[in-house]
C-alpha cells in the first residue's frame, strides 16, 4: 500500500474511533452509570441496567421477553468493573460475578433524557392527536380508496395514522358487500365483540331496545359508554342511503371541545373530568339479556392530566347519580356548557353508498339527523367495532416493514 493510501486509511480509522468514542463511570452516589457518547452525556440507573441484562439467563431473545428471576432481584446492585470494548459495547461485572453486555447504540435508543424519550413516544407509542373544529373539518377529513387500503400496506399505514391523528377517516368505492366493513377490521386485526352481533346493522327497526335503530334524530354520543373496556373505534359502511331528507351523519371532536372548555371554564372542566357518572344499558339482543353498568366521568384524563377518553350518551346516562348532592346542579351546568359546545361545533355530511366512515369512539361524538325511508330506499348501514390496541399494533407492524 502506498504511503498516501496508508495515511488515508489511518485517518478513516481515527475518525471512526473518535465518532464511536465512549467512556463510562459511576456517579458519586454509586447508583447511576454516566456514559459519555460522542460528547453527549447519558445517565443510566444501575438497577435498570441489571434489570435489562441481555444474557441468556436473564433474557429470552426469541420472544423478546425478560426472564430474570425477580423474586431474587437486588434493587441496589453494585458494579465491580466497567469496560467499553473496541466493538462499542458496555460490559459490566456485578458484585455477584454476573456479567451484562450492552450495545452502546442499544443504550442510546433507550436514553433517559426527556427529549429522547419524547421522540421515542411520538415515533413508537401513538401519533399525536390533532384536534379539529367545525371550521377545520374539511382539512381533517382524509379520504382513501377501499381497494388501496385492502391491498396496499403503505396506504393502510397512512389510513391508520390519519385515523389516530384526527379521530376519523373516510374510505370510498367500497364494494356492495355486507361484509365490507368487517373485511377492513379483519385486514387490520379482528372485530371487537360486544353484546350486539359482530357485524351490526343500523336501520329502522320497530320495537328495538336501541334508539340508534330508529329513524328519529340521534343525539351526539359515544357508543357503549357503559363498558369498562369500551370499544375504541367504529367502522360504518353505507350500503343504502335514503333518497329523501335527513339521514345526515353528525360529527364533533370531543377532544377539541373538552380542551376548549378547559381554557374557557376550568371549574366546569374539572367537574366533568372528576365527577363519576353511572352509564347503564339494559335490554336484550337476539334473545340474550344484558344489564351493563360502568362509572366514569364524561371527560377521562390520563396521569399527566391529558384528555384520554370521552364518555357521553344521553340515553345511557342512568337516573342513579351516586355523587354528593352538592355536586349535582354544578355538574349539570357544566355538562350543558360542554353539550352546547359540541353541538354548535358539529359537522354534517351525508354518507353515500360505497362509503365507509371510521370513528374514534373514545374521542369523537357522532349522531344522525332524522329521516324517512321511502318505498324505493331504506337507509341501511353495517358496522363493526375494533379496539385501538389492535389499530396501534398494526400501525407499528406496518411501520417496521417500511
Image (spheres, grey):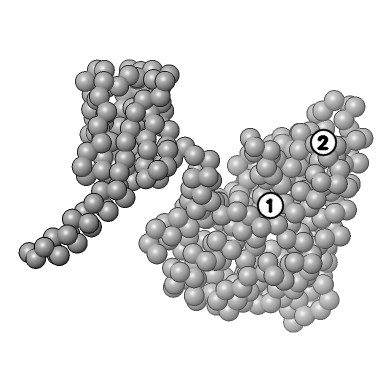
- Label 2 with label 1: CB-CB less than 8 Å: no
Q: In this figure, which residue is indicated by the disc labeled 1?
A: 363
Residue at point 80%, 36% (across, down):
270
Q: Residue furthest front?
A: 3
Q: In this figure, which residue is indicated by the disc labeled 2?
A: 271
Above or below, comparing residue 77 to residue 40 in the picture: above
Considering only order in the chain, which callout, 1 or 2, is on the residue closer to the N terminus? 2
Residue at point 30%, 44% (across, down):
21
Q: Which quarter of the rendering shows the C terminus? A: bottom left
The circle on residue 185 is none
Badge 2 density bin: few <14, some 14–19, many ≥20, Cα 10 Å: many
Residue 102 in the image: x percent, y percent? 29, 37
Above or below, comparing residue 32 to residue 299 in the picture: above
Q: Which quarter of the rendering shows the N terminus? A: bottom left
Residue 222 in the image: x percent, y percent? 72, 52
Badge 1 density bin: few <14, some 14–19, many ≥20, Cα 10 Å: many
Amino acid at each position: 500500500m502506498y504511503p498516501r493510501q496508508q495515511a488515508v486509511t489511518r485517518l478513516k480509522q481515527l475518525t471512526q474511533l473518535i465518532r464511536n468514542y465512549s467512556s463510562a463511570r459511576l456517579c458519586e452516589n454509586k447508583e447511576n452509570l454516566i456514559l459519555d457518547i460522542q460528547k453527549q452525556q447519558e445517565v443510566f440507573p444501575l438497577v435498570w441496567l441489571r434489570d435489562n441484562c441481555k444474557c441468556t439467563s436473564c433474557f429470552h431473545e426469541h420472544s423478546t421477553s425478560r426472564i430474570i428471576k425477580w423474586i431474587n432481584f437486588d434493587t441496589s446492585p453494585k458494579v465491580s468493573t466497567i469496560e467499553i470494548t473496541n466493538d462499542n459495547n458496555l460490559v459490566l461485572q456485578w458484585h455477584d460475578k454476573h456479567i451484562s453486555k450492552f450495545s452502546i447504540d442499544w443504550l442510546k435508543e433507550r436514553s433517559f433524557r426527556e427529549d429522547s424519550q419524547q421522540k421515542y413516544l411520538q415515533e413508537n407509542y401513538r401519533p399525536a392527536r390533532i384536534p379539529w373544529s367545525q371550521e377545520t373539518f374539511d382539512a381533517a377529513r382524509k379520504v382513501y380508496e377501499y381497494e388501496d387500503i385492502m391491498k396496499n400496506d403503505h396506504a393502510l399505514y397512512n389510513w391508520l395514522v390519519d385515523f389516530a391523528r384526527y379521530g376519523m377517516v373516510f374510505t370510498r368505492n367500497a364494494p356492495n358487500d355486507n361484509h365490507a366493513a368487517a373485511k377492513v377490521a379483519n385486514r387490520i386485526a379482528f372485530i371487537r365483540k360486544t353484546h350486539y352481533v359482530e357485524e351490526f346493522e343500523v336501520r329502522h327497526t320497530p320495537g328495538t331496545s336501541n334508539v340508534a335503530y330508529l329513524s328519529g334524530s340521534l343525539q351526539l354520543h359515544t357508543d357503549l359508554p357503559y363498558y369498562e373496556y369500551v370499544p375504541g373505534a367504529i367502522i360504518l359502511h353505507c350500503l343504502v342511503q335514503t333518497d329523501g331528507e335527513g339521514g345526515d351523519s353528525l360529527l364533533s371532536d370531543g377532544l377539541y371541545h373538552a380542551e376548549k372548555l378547559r381554557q374557557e371554564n376550568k371549574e366546569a372542566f374539572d367537574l366533568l373530568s372528576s365527577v363519576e357518572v353511572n352509564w347503564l344499558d339494559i335490554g336484550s339482543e337476539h334473545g340474550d339479556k344484558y344489564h351493563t353498568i360502568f362509572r366514569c366521568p364524561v371527560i377521562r384524563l390520563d396521569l399527566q392530566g391529558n384528555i384520554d377518553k370521552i364518555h357521553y350518551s344521553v340515553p345511557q346516562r342512568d337516573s342513579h347519580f351516586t355523587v354528593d348532592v352538592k355536586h349535582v346542579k354544578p355538574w349539570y351546568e357544566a355538562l350543558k356548557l360542554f353539550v352546547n359546545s359540541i353541538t354548535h361545533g358539529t359537522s354534517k355530511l351525508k354518507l353515500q353508498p360505497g362509503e365507509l366512515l371510521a370513528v374514534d369512539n373514545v374521542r369523537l361524538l357522532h349522531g344522525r339527523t332524522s329521516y324517512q325511508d321511502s318505498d324505493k330506499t331504506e337507509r341501511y348501514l353495517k358496522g363493526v367495532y375494533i379496539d385501538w390496541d389492535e389499530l396501534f399494533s398494526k400501525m407499528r407492524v406496518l411501520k417496521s416493514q417500511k
